[in-house]
Image (cartoon, rainbow, N blue to C red):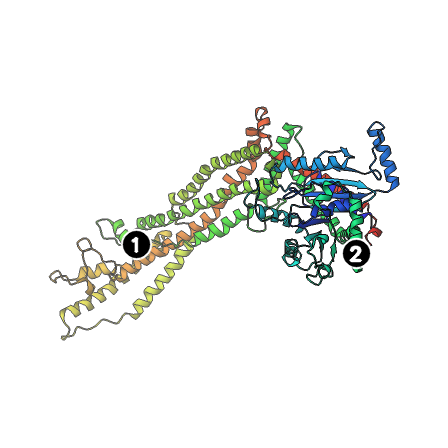
């Protein structure tokens, strides 16, 4: 058990060299109000006057005090070492060889304890100023003596309320935060110091200790100045724990007064007087109070506390060592051969870029699609769904189709639906596929840009060491993508233009659709003829208008029979037969109308001059007009679906060939050609300003953690129990 405290001291020394607080080591933290006797308690434990003394604010920086017990054999060995180091000069203390060492003075040994006190004052003034200012930067002092027990204590500035001298207005908050920083460490033991001549219920030390240790598992109370209590009062109830119970106990001590200090009263004499006072005033509690009992109690508490904390501490050190090793690896080694390093980084980036597209990269993104998977999603989900959502007849009303048919006939009434109207309308619809196709190219281009950032962040950490190289690579790849974008857009534009250049009505899929449509129309025509009533005899009661309508229907039926014969004569001529699908009964009806009859209103179904009368959008179409529009719409839809299928297949292929594959094939040669130049080596491989510093810090911390791991590994398992 005695070996545990020196182990913690060694660990503290190891981590002090790198100035890190990442490891929370077990230690005793002394907390109390200003002038409550904290420093006096520490001096009693040391047995020497080593701390600055006086009224007001004296302790203005944390003092980490390590007490190391040495036996006579160690003294002889140290004596021999000092003899060789100091040219044979032997320095002995009053009662044996005692000395101190500061961390900030390296290996300098202080044999005179007055010099130690002066050095503490000088170091405090150097950092905190000479007029009552405080600092959170600790002073590390190690005392070697045969008269001390192994302890590690932290003396903190006293809790104060009102700023004095150069102290800032928030001095109370600063000191409180400083105290909480140390006592919040779950591996620390809190030594709460309270003066006996104040009420325990108003103790600031116990209050702040209870904030971080509400159960009191690591709080020990010390009552100072037992000899300064008012006449007629004693601390019996306080020391017995009847006022405020503390789990680890309450220990009373008697400090030296300022007069004793001024008269150079030794600590040994003070301890003897303290023992006499306790025997006289508190005889039943004398053996459980006093400085010597406090030292033994602290030693025992600290050893048991270290024993409990050591397994977790060992695990923590090993985990941190692994983390810092990984961090150091990510920083890389200093560059020796710049030419080889540059070529290696360029090659690695190009390989990672291509692997990300192919889906074989080391770092697979789990949060979202990226790289080749994203490009595949754009092709088959985004682009495919967009094309499927395009309505083949979108933007075309029946009136638009009818108007196009009539405009294509010119001044002559047409017997057949003009083929020009079909071509004009289908080209107009196919043209609508160009915009989503170009948008597909843009989305793939954006994803190729995103892959650059992905490779920089996840795949090639080394690039982060060289920000100029990283920026140069991003610029080269972006430029390459930018050059390929217009080429790919032009190809996609041409794919749509190719479809517009030649409307192939001989396409097998289109021929099948036309044949099926002809059969349907022929079947509908036969059904209409079958449902037509026989010739209606003229009736005297019929009005002239009604008889004319009946005659028109009969004539129309006859005309449709002639038209059907014409279609059958031309039907074997191939694809041209779709023009013969229509009946021209309206012309026959028009020809049989008497010239003397005045034109009726359009609502009654009579012929109207469309050139003189504007066609209302909502007017009812004649049977022939409906059939003409229906044929054109079906043909447009059939041909549009064929073209859309072609575009949906050819655009991804064009994008892959002209953009994705071209960039993959040319990326490395482009990077090497643009960046692998002797004149650019030094500039591109310039590390960021803080990279070298961070690498050194990580290396120092890793070395400290490895050393700490070795120190803990030296402890035999039996020491823990």
Number of other residues with Cα within 10 Å of mark 2, as a class: few under 14, some 14 to 19, many 20 or more = few
Quarter of the image for residue 396 reads: bottom left
Q: CA distance from mark 1 to mark 2?
A: 121 Å
According to the image, label 2 marks what residue? 280
Judge left or right: residue 637 versus residue 665. left
Q: Nearer the viewer, residue 596 or 215?
A: 215
Q: Which mark is residue 401?
A: 1
Q: Residue at x 70, y 61 (%)?
A: 245
Q: Nearer the viewer, residue 203 or 518?
A: 203
Helix, strand or loop under label 2: helix
Pick out the residue farthest to the left: 596
- Return the disc, 1 or 2, that comes first in the chain's sequence: 2
Helix, strand or loop under label 1: helix
Q: Nearer the viewer, residue 111 or 649?
A: 111
Number of other residues with Cα within 10 Å of mark 1, as a class: few under 14, some 14 to 19, many 20 or more = many
**Above or below for 81 versus 71:** above
Pick out the residue farthest to the top: 679
Residue 522 lies, in percent from the top left, at 35, 62
């Amino acid at each position: 058990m005695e070996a545990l405290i020196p182990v913690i001291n060694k660990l503290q020394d190891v981590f002090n060299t790198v100035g890190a607080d990442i490891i929370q080591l077990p230690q005793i933290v002394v907390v109390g109000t200003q002038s409550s006797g904290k420093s006096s308690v520490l001096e009693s434990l040391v047995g020497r006057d080593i701390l600055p003394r006086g009224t007001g604010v004296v302790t203005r920086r944390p003092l980490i005090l390590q007490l190391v017990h040495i036996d006579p054999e160690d003294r002889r060995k140290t004596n021999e070492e000092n003899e060789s180091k100091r040219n044979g000069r032997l320095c002995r203390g009053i009662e044996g060889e005692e000395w101190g060492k500061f961390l900030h003075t390296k290996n300098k040994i202080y044999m005179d304890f007055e010099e130690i006190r002066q050095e503490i004052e000088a170091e405090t003034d150097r950092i905190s100023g000479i007029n009552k200012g405080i600092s959170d930067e600790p002073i590390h002092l190690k005392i070697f003596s045969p008269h001390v027990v192994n302890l590690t204590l932290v003396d903190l500035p006293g809790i104060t309320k009102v700023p004095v001298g150069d102290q800032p207005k928030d001095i109370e908050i600063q000191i409180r935060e400083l105290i909480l920083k140390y006592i919040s460490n779950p591996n620390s033991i809190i030594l709460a110091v309270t003066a006996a001549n104040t009420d325990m219920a108003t103790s600031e030390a116990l209050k702040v200790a209870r904030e971080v240790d509400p159960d009191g598992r690591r709080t020990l109370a010390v009552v100072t100045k037992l000899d300064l209590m008012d006449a007629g009062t004693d601390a019996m109830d306080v020391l017995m724990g009847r006022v405020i119970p503390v789990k680890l106990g309450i220990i009373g001590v008697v400090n030296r007064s300022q007069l004793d200090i001024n008269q150079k009263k030794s600590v040994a004499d003070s301890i003897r007087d303290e023992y006499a006072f306790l025997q006289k005033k508190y005889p039943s509690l004398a053996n459980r109070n006093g400085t010597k009992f406090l030292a033994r109690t602290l030693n025992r508490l600290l050893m048991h506390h270290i024993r409990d904390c050591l397994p977790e501490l060992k695990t923590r050190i090993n985990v941190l060592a692994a983390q810092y090793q990984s961090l150091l690896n990510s920083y890389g080694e200093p560059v020796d051969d710049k030419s080889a390093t540059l070529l290696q980084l360029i090659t690695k980036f190009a390989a990672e870029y291509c692997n990300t597209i192919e889906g074989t990269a080391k770092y697979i993104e789990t949060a979202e699609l990226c790289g080749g998977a994203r490009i595949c999603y754009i092709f088959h989900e985004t682009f495919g769904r967009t094309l499927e959502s395009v309505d083949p007849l979108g933007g075309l009303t029946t009136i638009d189709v009818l108007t196009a048919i009539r405009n294509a006939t010119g001044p002559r009434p047409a017997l057949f639906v003009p083929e020009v109207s079909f071509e004009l309308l289908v080209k107009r619809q196919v043209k609508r596929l160009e915009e989503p196709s170009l948008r597909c190219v843009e989305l793939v281009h954006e994803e190729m840009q995103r892959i650059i950032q992905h490779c920089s962040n996840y795949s090639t950490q080394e690039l982060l060491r060289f920000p100029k190289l990283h920026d140069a690579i991003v610029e080269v790849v972006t430029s390459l993508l930018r050059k390929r974008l217009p080429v790919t857009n032009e190809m996609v534009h041409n794919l749509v233009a190719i479809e517009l250049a030649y409307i192939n009505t001989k396409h097998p899929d289109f021929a099948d659709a036309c044949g099926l449509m002809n059969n349907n129309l022929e079947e509908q025509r036969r059904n209409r003829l079958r449902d037509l009533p026989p010739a209606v005899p003229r009736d005297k009661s019929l009005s002239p208008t009604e008889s004319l309508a009946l005659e028109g229907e009969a004539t129309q039926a006859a005309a449709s029979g002639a038209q059907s014969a014409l279609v059958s004569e031309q039907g074997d001529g191939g694809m041209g037969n779709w023009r013969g699908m229509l009946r021209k009964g309206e012309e026959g009806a028009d020809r049989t109308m008497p010239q003397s009859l005045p034109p009726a209103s359009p609502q009654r179904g009579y012929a109207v001059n469309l050139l003189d009368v504007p066609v209302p959008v909502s007017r009812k179409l004649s049977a022939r007009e409906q059939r003409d529009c229906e044929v054109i719409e079906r043909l447009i839809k059939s041909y549009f679906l064929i073209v859309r299928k072609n575009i949906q297949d050819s655009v991804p292929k064009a994008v892959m060939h002209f953009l994705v594959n071209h960039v993959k094939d040319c990326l490395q040669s482009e990077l090497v050609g643009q960046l692998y130049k002797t004149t650019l080596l030094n500039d591109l491989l310039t590390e960021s300003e803080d990279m070298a510093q961070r690498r050194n810090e990580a290396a120092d911390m890793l070395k400290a953690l490895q050393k700490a791991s070795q120190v803990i590994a030296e402890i035999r398992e039996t020491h823990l129990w």
